[in-house]
Image: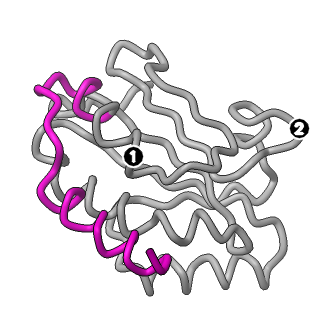
Amino acid sequence: EEPEDPGAKAVLLTFFASWCEPCKREMPFLVQLDKMYRDQGLRVIGVCIDKEEPGIEAAKKLVAEKKVVYPVLSDRFNFLARRYLGEKAPLPSIFIIRRDGVIAKIERGYAKDASAFLLGEVQDAIGIERRPGKQAAAEKPAKAAAVGK
């Protein structure tokens, strides 16, 4: 039943919806993680939980806009959302699932900036030494400056 992907070491399952602002903000970071670590065994999969047609269309536009190349599934009946997120489906939510099926990390409805915790978690899950990404480090000062420090 399992499609064999011998290169896969971990799957990062990210749940999002067209109306979720933090989801939109972190998408470029997920695109970057996918780019940086796909060859090292990371598989990023997006799950859109919009139920209505306009939302689904808006989510598709968002995915195109953010140049997402990882697979994005539509969970319009929220089968996956209920299984992973529960009835309330807080967003954004992320699961890192190791090759052996063990869920290494669950973050449901987090408020913090995903780039702060995700990079290290991904590096752990695919078994490479934790080190700050050049791009991740380069983005930080720009964000702080924008806040008006």
Secondary structure under tag 1 reads helix
Residue located at (69% from left, 55% from top):
75
Q: Position of residue 71 (x, y in %)?
A: 41, 59
The image shows residue 50, relative to residue 82, as above or below, that is below
User: How many residues crowd mark 1 within 10 Å: few (<14), some (14–19), many (20+)?
Assistant: few
Q: SS for tag 2?
A: loop
The CA distance from mark 1 to mark 2 is: 27 Å
Q: Residues within 10 Å of mark 2 (few under 14, many from 20)?
A: few
Going by the numbered disc 2, the residue's amino acid type is Glu
| Magenta span includes 135 | yes
The quarter holding residue 74 reads bottom right
Residue 136, quarter of picture: bottom left
Q: Quadrant of the N terminus?
A: top left
Observer-nearest residue: 66 or 22? Answer: 22
- The answer to the question of whether label 1 and label 2 lie on touching residues, with beta carbons closer than 8 A, is no
- Picture coordinates of residue 19 (x, y %)? 74, 73
Q: Position of residue 53 (x, y in %)?
A: 79, 80
**Left or right, residue 72 beside residue 54:** left
Q: Which residue is mark 1?
A: 116
x and y, in percent, of residue 76 in the image: 76, 60
Q: Which residue is mark 2?
A: 87
Q: How many marks?
A: 2
What is the residue that sits farthest to the right in this orientation? 87
